[in-house]
Image (cartoon, helix red, strand yellow):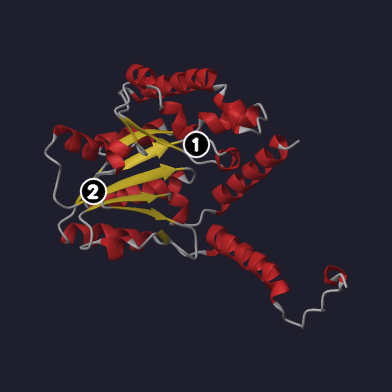
Amino acid sequence: MNTSLRPLPTPPRGAPHRAPRRSLLRRLYSRLYADYLMPSRLAEYEKLLMQAGQAGYAQLSVRDFYRAVQRGDGGPARVLVHRHDIDSDLRTARKMFDLEVRHGVRASYYFRLSTLDIGFMRAIEAAGSEASYHYEEVATYAKHHRLRRGCEVRACFPEIRVQFERNFMRISTELGLRMATVASHGDFANRRLKVINHELLRDPELRRRCGIECESYDNELLRHFDLYVSDRPYPVFYYPVSPFEALGRHARICFLTHPVQWETNWVENTRCNMVRLAEELVWHT
């Protein structure tokens, strides 16, 4: 008898087939909580700055740390490098910067075109920290031209590099200084296409023309860290471990943060959610 045609038994009430719905509801609640209900975590961030200082960690920008290792002296024995990707929420970014100034901490702030604030960037540089470019030309180009395959996007890299160089030089001119390091932004389009923005800078001549010393995902930088920690949305908060746990266990730590993970901003989060939805709809139309 062909057993493949037997009807499947009816699952009992509460069987595992209902789990995806509960998982979806849980994810939806977590997103709503993170975007609109979560209390400020800035006191936690200040606590980290203080504990790192008390534990003997020099707290530096990406630029300062990279230049230290390039000089060959290796930099401080214990170091916590702060990298902030300003995907959104300039308000919280300014609060984080104020905390760092209060505690003598230096950090790198990478701004997208959509979050560019030249006055704020100049204040960051004046305080001894670093302000630079969080670039995303690959994803922007793909969405604008509705490219849905990675090979199509890579074929357009020469044109996309021209756009990157134009944007980079314009920001440098407005800022009044040469930006030494840059950081690739990760967009939903990059994940779908399996093409990262960082690929664009696998061009020595482009880097030379722009004066870029280092991309924040370069192996020449990352290999000098013992641990790379990134913040995450509620309820995870940190990956792969909490930076508090890392202090004392690891000598050289890079800590990537995004202001949106540290304080809710109803207006900004709603705007970003609407922009993301619109981009999805246009890209797939």
Is 38 above or below relative to 102?
below
Quadrant containing the N terminus is bottom right
In the picture, the disc for residue 196 is 1
**Residue type indicated by callout 2:** Val
- Which one is nearer the viewer's eye here, 123 or 256? 256
74 is higher (above) or lower (below) than 243? above
Q: Residue at x 24, y 61 (%)?
A: 247
Residue 235 x, y percent position in the rendering: 49, 66
Vertical placement of residue 43 versus 137, above or below = below
> Mark 2 or mark 1, which is nearer to you?
1
The one of 203 and 55 positioned closer to us in this rendering = 203
Which residue is identified by label 2? 105
From the top left corner, tell me how far across and down residue 270 is, in percent: 61, 50
Label 2 crowding class (10 Å Cα cut-off): few <14, some 14-19, many 20+? many
> Can the viewer see residue 59 in this picture?
yes
Task: Please tell me the numbered disc located at residue 63.
Answer: none
Which residue occupies 41% across, 27% down? 201
Local SS, label 1 = loop
Q: What residue lies at 39% left-to-right and 19% top-to-bottom? A: 206
Q: Residue furthest left?
A: 73
User: In the rendered structure, are the residues bearing label 2 and label 1 in contact, judged by CB atoms less than 8 Å apart?
Assistant: no
The residue at 51%/18% (across/down) is: 158
Q: Where the C terminus falls, by quadrant?
A: top right
